[in-house]
Amino acid sequence: MRHVISILLENEAGALSRVVGLFSQRGYNIDSLTVAPTDDPTLSRCTILTTGEKDEAEQITKQLHKLVCVFRVSALLEEAEGGLERELVLVKLYTPNRSIRDEVKSLADIFHARIIDLNAEIFTLEFVGSSAESDNFIETLGKIVEIQEVVRSGLVGIAKGSHFMKP
């Protein structure tokens, strides 16, 4: 089962290491990890995607609460249940002829992706969507064009409505 955990932690050296170490000590894999400072420069927001049983995710959440550097921990819900998640994807494609370039442009329009760099034989596209949408975008592109490189930002998430993560 897929679990998205959002953590508000101190923006200082070693804080992220302690969070990641907790996962490592318990043998849990991190599928995606995204961290950046918040509007308060003393705090960072960390979003972790992991898979496992529900009780394992609950155990991780309880253990995270015990870390000194952690202020808040929240398990984000699926989008249908009140959570929002997005991921940035950059894809570099080999586009050797007009036919392929036109097809890539059409797909970019369909997926609301942007062409952010191009030359005679290479297009670089930017796509923002959920993890499932990102997977679908990459898979669809791969069926019509040779993908040279893919970079994914990792998942970021936030609760819908009036639910906030404040210290």
Image (tube, grey):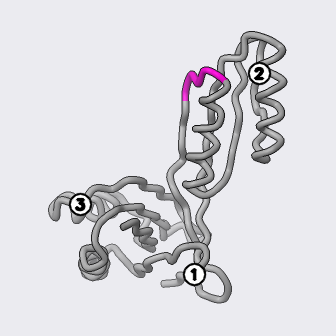
- What percent of the width, then of the height, locates residue 67? 26, 76
**Overall secondary structure of the magenta section:** strand
Q: Which mark is residue 28?
A: 3
Circle 1 packing at 10 Å, graded few (<14), some (14-19), many (20+), is few
Q: Which mark is residue 81?
A: 1
In space, the residues marked 2 and 1 are separated at their CA atoms by 39 Å
User: Which label's residue is closer to the chain start, 2 or 1?
Assistant: 1
The residue sitting at 58% across, 76% down in the picture is 83
Circle 2 packing at 10 Å, graded few (<14), some (14-19), many (20+), is few
The residue sitting at 60% across, 38% down in the picture is 138
Amino acid at dot 2: Leu
User: Which label's residue is closer to the chain start, 3 or 1?
Assistant: 3
Q: Which mark is residue 118?
A: 2
Mark 3 and mark 1 in contact? Answer it, CB < 8 Å: no
Residue 153 or residue 31, whichever sits in front: 31
- What percent of the width, then of the height, locates residue 127? 69, 44
Inspect the magenta stretch and tell me whether residue 146 lies in it: yes
**Element class at badge 1:** helix
Q: Is residue 81 above or below residue 1?
A: below
- What percent of the width, then of the height, locates residue 147? 59, 24
**Location of residue 150 by image quarter:** top right
Amino acid at dot 1: Glu
Amino acid at dot 3: Tyr
